């Protein structure tokens, strides 16, 4: 395929704060990562939608294959992990109303293992096998051995044909369970072929060795290997996606990506820097080079100006109309086709499908800026590279995305105040408190604190000064808030280090830990502030487990021409002359370059 | 009915320790309570089985009605609690294999509120209503007003008949939605009757007042009241059970009772003494006077000697055979009947049903000890009173039950050692360490500690002495262990008190807390030690969410004749002469008397 689209459905969103507290307008990417890691990872990703898109150049259309995987950590034996996961009633109720089939998940869900669990299980099997065989190494026939056609010498054809016939008979007749073959030079006398039912649906064929000892150990090895593959289960699909090197598309995909790493690879690292480091240095093949978030794309120029609502369903509708063109996509033979008119929203496979449609429309639209214009822009086009590996940050006012490839944006927040107050206070109390300062915006952090952004940065110091002797509330600048938070973190770390040093030392000895260092640089930007959507809508969407939200994301301006030049230079170096006549459009600047 | 049987199915059993660590053989009732409170209460009780049994004296048989309630905390509006609950894969998988219908739970489950949530919701509605009506009080027609027949005066019959006819027409014709009635003295002119669909299935009839203001407020009150009742949902059934004063039967019911209180009343109190206090002093009607655990009953004399396996399914089979007789039970008309031969085990309604059958057989068996013998022993018989309010303690070696009505048993544990060791140690290492002491029994506490019971109490001090200079492990007597634990608790409490005193003071001001003081006395008993079941079986049962286990429960001997005398005295006082000729049987002594 040319690209893949994915989507996940979860058993819940937040085990603590409300969605509005979980997505504060002034979260930094690091803070957002920490909150999602802390409050969202105990839920289960129990439906994984995957759509593959392949462009047919002759027919000028995409061929699509869609998959809905139901996922459940069914314990496969007594020593396997007994996973506990959390369910959030509102999310479950939301999915129930969409007709989600919970019985499919819990009765027939595909199991999975993360990497550590898989490693442990392999070790267990290895141990068992080496016990069964003594210490010596073992020769075996792997069912996964490369299958390639073998040329049969003319003089052996008759013999082989007879063997094939015997085996076909064995397979036809369900009552026969084994077959002794005539001896030949290829294998020792007494070898026989046997069918085995590894589960109730499939019968499998095994070549059995004559020595009873070897027979048993090989058979059990083959069985174990299959059991192991079954146990690793859906993780194998995820590994295949990650290792494919394909562009992977998602809509508002931060949570999907975090869940996928957490559930199928390993618990998420302690901080964001380690996560991005982890992406690049430890497992560079995972997802990393090729993620694209359609919600970010739609929130960025040139789409931003012409798309009002970036929620998935609305986006898909909008992209069928001018100046966009509906993409030509057909289901592959034998694959179910989705009807966008009937809107089977929130089945993961359907959501992945329309995410792919959105990407195609937007990518093709970029082609209209080329000279000469192109109708089809492929997933490999340089035009879409600026959108790679930047994940949409929902409801953050001045940072549009979390950057997996480099330093995150550091907007100036010199118009922002951090206010602490009694828990009885409501938004109206804050409006009253700041009534002298004109228009303000309130972003709740928790019951007793919020960020308040003023329209004029000059008023910030006045507000802080006037509050100096207030008893019931406290005001500090955003910079002061950040500094104190940093100090507290340091102090806490010191304290923890002192008392737990010994324990930590032990832990490090036995466990694999993430040791990446942050490469995050600093840079200040002038943020453009925009109006946020209505509160009502936020709450409405709060019930949606996908909590995809039409929230304006302010687009940071580039801080100089240097970057533009650098961009041009890279382009010139990377694009073979004459192959793509790339016009560097203004809209590309809005994204941080790698 | 004469008695009720209940059973619950949960989304999991333990969110931390394995079932074998959760149920250590030397747990005290307090420790067991703490562990279950800490590790089991975040799961959801999502199927509640209820069976009512009524004895038909003429037919000499019980008439049974069975109910399966699917329960799910569906949020009913935006401000309603968004419950998060945990699922344990092994429990979910176990239920899936039994054909459990998860779609029924999550799509159509009945909601519930605990008492605090219900109170808050009522307050919200009251506030809304008083806002809508000004501050004044409101007269309204409650749909729950007592319905009793009204005698209609002769001269008004014709008028009433006409009204009834008009209303019947309104109901027959689905298109008509309102009807204006003729004025009369009973109500002001202009009143009319209206049907309203409160959901998609039921149409309801409302009497509407002429004044538009009153009209709206009354209508919305009626709707709100219905909404409120719907939101309280299944809790109303639980309240009805608790307030019925009926004997409530369960099998291995400690977890069922804890979950029921926790989910439908309030979070469980901090310690067991407060729980039992809570039962008696705060809400004496809850369950308290009439709980009976059939697993405890079957593990106690005279049943103990003739019943090998007390797991529910095995017990039910055993109680059909001599010396027991299968009870005569029939389903009430219109109620589904269960077939014990097909064993629909682990549907809550079925489990409740066979729990009831077990109780009937065992109660009737007690009648055979009377002179003259009785075939039918009712749920009100004095013969079963010794079993009241004592909940089976699974796998505890020397304390058969948790006593809801008085002090718990305090067995001597002078043959028990507490051993701490490196986490690499296995049971075999402990056997080796104590190889000089003959037969020992190991009860794992966690990775690095276990109780080891010796056959001879005299050996305890020898073991402690010989270990004095050991480096890798540490041995102390059970008494030392208890004392140290107590000291640590006190120290911790002191520390917490110092630093959190202020916060605690605040909390106490605003919250309702459990303030009961323990009434637990002390008493020593000579425990009889028994063999535990095989490890394999324990693990097998560990996968069972009900984790009902055939584990021997040692029966404590009475510590003197004084109690027997006291018992006789009570009996003599309470039983009206000549009504019941109660022979005080030896087997009654095995239970603590209230």
Image: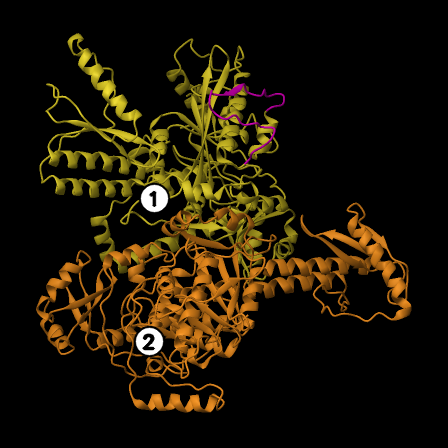
Chain colours: A yellow, B orange
- Residue B62 among those drawn in magenta: no
Q: Chain of mark 2?
A: B
**Badge count:** 2
Q: Which residue is mark 2?
A: B302
Q: Chain of mark 1?
A: A
Q: Which residue is mark 1?
A: A269
Q: Nearer the viewer, residue A196 or A13?
A: A196
Q: Count neighbours of disc 2 (C-alpha within 10 A) and say few if under 14, some if 14 to 19, many if 20 or more.
A: some
Residue B233, quarter of picture: bottom right
The image position of residue A564, as x and y in percent, is 46, 23
Residue A548, quarter of picture: top right
Q: Count neighbours of disc 1 (C-alpha within 10 A) and say few if under 14, some if 14 to 19, many if 20 or more.
A: some
- Whether residue A19 can be seen here: no
- Which segment is the magenta one? A320-345
Q: Is residue B356 above or below residue A13?
A: below
Judge from the rendering whether residue A556 lies leftward or rightward of residue A230; answer left or right. right
Q: Quadrant of the N terminus of chain B?
A: bottom right
Q: Nearer the viewer, residue A222 or A375?
A: A222
Disc 1 from disc 2: Cα separation: 59 Å
- Residue A329 among those drawn in magenta: yes
Circle 1 SS class: loop
The image position of residue B284, as x and y in percent, is 52, 77
Q: Nearer the viewer, residue B266 or B195?
A: B195
Q: Main secondary structure of the magenta part?
A: loop
- Residue drawn at x 89%, y 70% is B154
- Residue drawn at x 12%, y 21% is A183
- The answer to whether dots 1 and 2 both sit on one chain is no
Q: Is residue B212 above or below residue A235?
A: below
The image position of residue A51, as x and y in percent, is 46, 28
């Amino acid at each position: 395929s040319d690209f893949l689209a994915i989507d996940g459905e979860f058993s819940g969103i937040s085990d603590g704060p409300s969605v509005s507290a979980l997505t504060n307008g002034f979260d930094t990417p690091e803070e957002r990562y920490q909150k999602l890691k802390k409050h969202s990872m105990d839920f289960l990703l129990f439906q994984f939608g995957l759509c593959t898109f392949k462009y047919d150049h002759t027919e000028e259309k995409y061929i699509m294959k869609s998959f809905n995987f139901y996922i459940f950590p069914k314990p496969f034996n007594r020593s396997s992990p007994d996973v506990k996961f959390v369910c959030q009633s509102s999310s479950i109720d939301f999915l129930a109303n969409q007709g989600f089939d919970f019985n499919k998940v819990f009765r027939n869900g595909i199991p999975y293992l993360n990497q550590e669990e898989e490693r442990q299980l392999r070790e267990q099997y290895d141990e068992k096998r080496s016990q069964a065989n003594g210490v010596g190494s073992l020769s075996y026939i792997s069912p996964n051995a490369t299958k390639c056609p073998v040329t049969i010498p003319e003089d052996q054809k008759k013999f082989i044909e007879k063997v094939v016939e015997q085996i076909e008979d064995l397979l036809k007749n369900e009552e026969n369970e084994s077959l002794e073959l005539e001896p030949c030079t290829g294998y020792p006398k007494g070898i026989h072929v046997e069918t085995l039912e590894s589960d109730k649906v499939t019968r499998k064929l095994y070549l059995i060795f004559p020595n009873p000892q070897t027979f048993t150990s090989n058979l059990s090895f083959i069985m174990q290997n299959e059991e192991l593959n079954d146990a690793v289960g859906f993780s194998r699909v995820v590994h295949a996606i990650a290792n494919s090197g394909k562009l992977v598309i998602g809509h508002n995909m931060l949570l999907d990506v975090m869940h996928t790493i957490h559930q199928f690879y390993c618990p998420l690292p302690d901080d964001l820097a380690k996560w991005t480091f982890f992406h690049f240095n430890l497992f560079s093949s995972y997802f990393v080079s090729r993620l694209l978030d359609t919600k970010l794309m739609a929130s960025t120029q040139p789409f931003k100006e012409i798309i009002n609502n970036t929620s998935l369903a609305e986006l898909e509708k909008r992209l069928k109309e001018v100046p966009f063109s509906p993409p030509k996509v057909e289901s592959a033979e034998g694959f179910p086709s989705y009807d966008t008119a009937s809107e089977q929203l929130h089945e993961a496979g359907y959501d992945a499908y329309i995410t792919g449609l959105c990407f195609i429309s937007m990518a093709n639209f970029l082609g209209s800026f080329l000279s000469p214009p192109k109708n089809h822009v492929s997933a490999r086009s340089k035009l879409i590279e600026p959108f790679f590996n930047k994940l949409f940050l929902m409801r953050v006012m001045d940072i549009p995305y979390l950057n997996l490839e480099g330093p995150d944006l550091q907007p100036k927040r010199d118009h922002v105040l951090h206010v602490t107050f009694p828990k009885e206070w409501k938004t109206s109390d804050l409006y009253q408190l700041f009534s002298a300062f004109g228009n303000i915006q309130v972003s709740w952090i928790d019951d007793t604190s919020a960020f308040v952004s003023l329209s004029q940065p000059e008023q910030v110091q006045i507000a802080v000064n006037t509050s100096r002797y207030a008893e019931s509330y406290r005001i500090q600048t955003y910079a002061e808030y950040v500094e104190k938070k940093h100090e507290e973190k340091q102090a806490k770390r010191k304290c923890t280090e002192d008392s737990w040093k010994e324990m930590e030392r032990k832990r490090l000895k036995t466990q694999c830990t993430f040791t990446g260092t942050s490469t995050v640089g600093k840079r200040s930007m002038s943020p453009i502030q925009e109006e946020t959507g209505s509160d009502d809508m936020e709450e409405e969407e709060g019930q949606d487990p996908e909590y995809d939200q039409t929230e304006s994301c302010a687009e940071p301006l580039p801080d100089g021409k240097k970057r533009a030049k650098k961009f041009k230079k890279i382009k010139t170096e990377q694009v073979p002359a004459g192959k793509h006549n790339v016009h560097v459009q203004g809209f590309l600047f809005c994204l941080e370059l790698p």
